[in-house]
Every structure is written in C-alpha cells, then in structure tokens.
Image (spheres, rainbow, N blue to C red):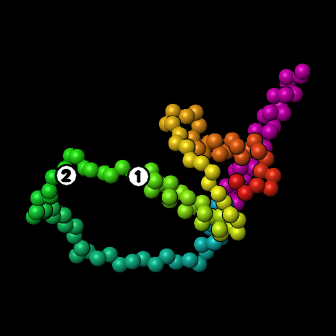
C-alpha cells in the first residue's frame, strides 16, 4: 500500500469537508444578514418605577392533622376481579361481532419467568398470527 497516496487522500477529504463547512457557515451568515435588511426591532420603554419586592412568607393558620400510620386498604376480591375481566372480554368480543368463551381461570405465581405481556409477545411471534385476532 502506498502510504503517501493514502495520507494525501485523507488530507484532501478532510480539507474538502472543512472548506464546504466554512462555505455553508458563510452562506447562512449572509442569508441571515439579507433577511434582516430593513428590519427595525421595536424597543419597549423601560418602566423605571418598577422595583422588586421580597416575597412574604406566612405560616399556615391551621395545623394539619397527622396522617395515620396504618391505613386499611381493602384487598380486592378475586371474584370481583374475575367478573371485571370477564365483562371486558365479552365487551371486546361483542364489539368485534364474535362470541368469546372463558374456559378456565388459573392464578399465576409471582415467580414466573416472563410477565404476561412478555408471554403474549412470545406466543404472538411464534404463532405467526395466521387469521387469528389474538
């Protein structure tokens, strides 16, 4: 390999890039100057009587009540969750003009390898989605 030729090619390429960059900067500068010919900016009068005041901080008149440490949050009922999911599936299938049937409900462990969304993505990509809605 001819190192002189390689170095001269690299130097020429860098020089051309920087020359074009300088020309582009010059063109933008000229365009901005040409665009502002005849433009007079309006100067707003200064109000000299305006002074900054320190903000006044006041303490609240009423002391807030302490927040209780133990707040009773009711646990959602499993049957209620199943009813909501069943209603959503039936509403979705009725909107598409199809009838859906829930075959079974199984509670999943928290220690699964994939989330429900991850499992749905894997099954979608593996099935090919040939004519299926979901």
Quarter of the image where the C terminus is located? bottom right
Q: Position of residue 46 (x, y in %)?
A: 32, 75
Residue 128 included in the magenta stretch of the image: no
Q: Are marks 2 and 1 in contact (CB under 8 Å)?
A: no
Q: Nearer the viewer, residue 97 or 61?
A: 97
On the image, which quarter does residue 36 sit in? bottom right
**Residue lying at 14% horizontally and 58% vertically, measured from the top left:** 64
Can you identify the residue that label 1 sits on? 77
Say the numbered circle drawn on residue 67: 2
| Residue 44 visible in rendering | yes
Left or right for 81, reference 53? right
Element marked by disc 2: loop
Image depth: mark 2 or mark 1 in front: 1
Number of numbered discs? 2
Element marked by disc 1: loop
55 vs 8: above or below:
below
Say the numbered circle drawn on residue 92: none
- Dot 1, how many residues are within 10 Å of its Cα: few (below 14), some (14-19), or many (20+)? few
Task: Answer with mark 2 or mark 1, whichever residue precedes in sequence.
Answer: 2
126 vs 48: above or below:
above
- Which residues are drawn in magenta? 1-27
Q: Marks 2/1: CA distance? A: 27 Å
Q: Position of residue 28 (x, y in %)?
A: 67, 61
Q: Position of residue 69 (x, y in %)?
A: 21, 46
On the image, which quarter does residue 39 sit in? bottom right
**Residue lying at 42% horizontally and 77% vertically, measured from the top left:** 43
Q: Give the prevailing secondary structure in the magenta stretch.
A: helix
Q: Nearer the viewer, residue 95 or 64?
A: 95
Q: Position of residue 107 (x, y in %)?
A: 52, 42
| Residue 31 visible in rendering | no
**Residue lying at 83% horizontally and 31% vertically, measured from the top left:** 8
């Amino acid at each position: 390999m001819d190192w002189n030729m390689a170095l001269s090619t690299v130097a020429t390429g860098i020089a051309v890039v920087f020359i074009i960059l300088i020309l582009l900067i010059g063109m933008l500068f000229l365009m901005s100057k040409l665009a502002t010919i005849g433009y007079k900016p309006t100067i707003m009068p200064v109000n000299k009587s305006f002074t900054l005041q320190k903000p006044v901080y006041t303490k609240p008149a009423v002391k807030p009540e302490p927040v209780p440490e133990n707040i009773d949050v009711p646990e959602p009922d499993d049957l209620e969750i199943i009813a909501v999911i069943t209603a959503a599936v039936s509403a979705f299938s009725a909107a598409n003009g199809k009838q859906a049937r829930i075959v079974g409900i199984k509670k999943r462990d928290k220690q699964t390898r994939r989330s429900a969304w991850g499992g749905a993505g894997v099954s979608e990509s593996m099935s090919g989605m040939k004519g299926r809605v979901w």
